[in-house]
Amino acid sequence: MINFTVGPVQSSDAVRAIGAEQVPYFRTAEFSSIMLENESLVKKFAHTTEDSRVVFMTCSGSGGMETAIMNCLTKEDKALVINGGSFGERFVELLTLHGIPFSEIKLQHGKALRPEHLAPYEGKGYSAFLLQKHETSTGVHFDIKLVSDFCKRNGCFLIVDTISTFLADPFDMAALDAGVMITGSQKALACPPGIAIIALAPSALKRIEKSKCCCQYFDLKLALKNQDRGQTPWTPAVGVLRQINVRLKEIDASGGDTAEIARTAHLAEYFRRKLKEYNLPFEIISDSLSNALTPLHPTTQSAHQIFLKIKDEYGMWICPNGGDMKDTVFRVGHIGYLNETDYDRLIEAFIDLKEKNFI
Amino acid sequence: MINFTVGPVQSSDAVRAIGAEQVPYFRTAEFSSIMLENESLVKKFAHTTEDSRVVFMTCSGSGGMETAIMNCLTKEDKALVINGGSFGERFVELLTLHGIPFSEIKLQHGKALRPEHLAPYEGKGYSAFLLQKHETSTGVHFDIKLVSDFCKRNGCFLIVDTISTFLADPFDMAALDAGVMITGSQKALACPPGIAIIALAPSALKRIEKSKCCCQYFDLKLALKNQDRGQTPWTPAVGVLRQINVRLKEIDASGGDTAEIARTAHLAEYFRRKLKEYNLPFEIISDSLSNALTPLHPTTQSAHQIFLKIKDEYGMWICPNGGDMKDTVFRVGHIGYLNETDYDRLIEAFIDLKEKNFI
């Protein structure tokens, strides 16, 4: 099977080799040094300030999103949230559950964020801003500079979900003055799922210091205190953390985040060029693309039927959508251990389906 | 390295082979069938009633403990909790954080639970009971029948942490009328850490139905609704769940939980017999042992120094203790992919240390 979804994605041979090893005992100096190295490399690739911190939580990216909200926001905040798809909707649900007052900027699926969307909220006393840098459900890559500038003008604490865009598109946490960045092990980091990674600027650390988290497992005060010595309060997904270590070092040795982003951008362009070249009956539904994925609306067949066909008859996974996009949108990912030949095979499958009048 | 800790423990070759594979996309019928099979086999080995359910949460065992409390108990409960070590203490912390009224039965480290400990609480209106079936920090295997009988007489909802004892010592959830059983992937299940497994009796399902969980990630209503179709609300540790599947089928094919428990009991007896045979300067500190581990107090050297020596000079991990037991107690586990020869090597190392007057 070739995996073109956006997580879990394909891993390198070095990462898979670690998966085959016995998982070591972890309350040791050896494991601590791996964890401290992981922290340091994530800081490097996220371009954080020196006094920022990174913690590794054993949970999904959604767990990371909730952790950020529970530890960094309070009922005294007034938050602004971009809701451009399923993941924006999740932020809305979480803010509601945790009783954080908020306003929601609801964007049409596939549409970019523009200055006029933010204008009405200027100078209205907002203290926090939450968004997906890349709304993975619809493949819209939001203009983070626009949001960052708004936050700087308005004194907003900025929480950025970069789950599917970290290492796929440029991100400079310090320059953007973001307070929190959230990502996951199974996206461009190309490791098995199980770990959410949260980078915390000093502004976040100050908020965490004062907060009282309603959930012990997700208490960032405990996570930070343990990460001081390269440990975690609870038994973490040790195997995945070791794979993250190998992968971060792999990226570091190959030119860092810049080279990894360029590699992904190249694959995305390659695939999009081929789509046009063969005049496939798919429309790109996003007007602001990330390198991480291409969201497509098939004009001649149900998206879900195409997903099933490609899985069952061609041995490849493209990424299906759920809910009301189930039949109208599928996505093709460009993160993970993929190359041009893989895309050639996918394009061939599409051409075959077109010749058979399936699409 | 040979791993004698109590988690992560050593995995079988079949489990490790899965670790080497690419992690597949999981919103598929194929992954759903794995998840439903996992549920069914855990029910079988935990001896649940037919109408019980099992969910798989991507978190540590401690996350599982907190999930049980958040979803099954309320401020209207009056809970009784056994605190016999670090994990009992964790239950106490969690009940405190979540505002569940409770009384604590604090036991001396290493001491068994006896009827006189429970007598004062008889007929006092307790509605819930929480305990570790095996307090892993001190290796005390509590008399679960005693607790179950108390719960039946007093109408208590019983939450049992079986994290380190599931598949190592007998457990019959239906006969004990337990409401919740919690375990983890990295103990006797011998898979990498990352998944907590929670079995829920109908009494628990009824409580969950009425509860409002303060954390979306740990909301069992969402987990149960998704598990109906073999899925999870958030991206789970797909790799570990596939390893759990292979391992559960391995156990099923080798005689089920009874055979696995007998295998572990045999290794525990083998090691304990050798300890005596060679007159090693260690005292067993628990007066009620589990098959899962042997907790030892070394009489001639710091426990932590022995842990470091065995790790650095003999290539083996024994399990260190933390806090005020750091220098007085270490533990030797009997769960995971171990055999008699492994214990021979450990005993040889101890003999060597004795000859060198280190212990």
Image (spheres, coloured by chain):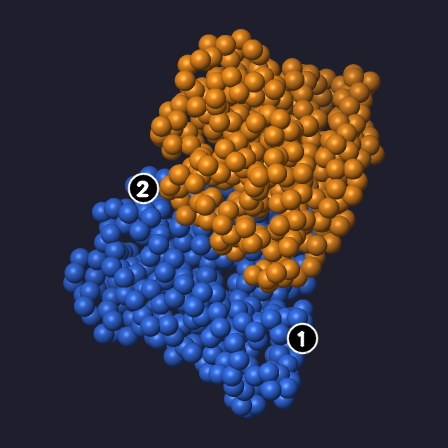
Chain colours: A blue, B orange
Name the residue type under label 2. Answer: Ser
Q: Foreground: A282 or A333?
A: A282
Relative vertical location of residue B40 with respect to residue A279 in this rendering, above or below: above
Q: Foreground: A46 or B23?
A: B23
- Identify the residue at image location x=56%, y=33%: B181
**Residue B163, horizontal then vertical, whole percent:** 59, 34
User: Which label belongs to residue A211?
Assistant: 2
Q: Foreground: B306 or B137?
A: B137
Q: Are marks 2 and 1 in contact (CB under 8 Å)?
A: no
State the separation of the CA atoms marked 2 and 1. Answer: 51 Å
Query: What residue is pinned by disc 1?
Result: A314
Relative vertical location of residue A19 with respect to residue A307 in this rendering, above or below: above
**Residue A103, horizontal then vertical, whole percent:** 24, 59
Q: Nearer the viewer, mark 2 or mark 1?
A: 1
Q: Is residue B322 visible?
A: no
Using the image, name the chain to which the residue with label 1 belongs: A
From the viewer's perspective, is A107 left or right of A290? Answer: left
- The secondary structure type at the circle numbered 1 is helix
Using the image, name the chain to which the residue with label 2 belongs: A
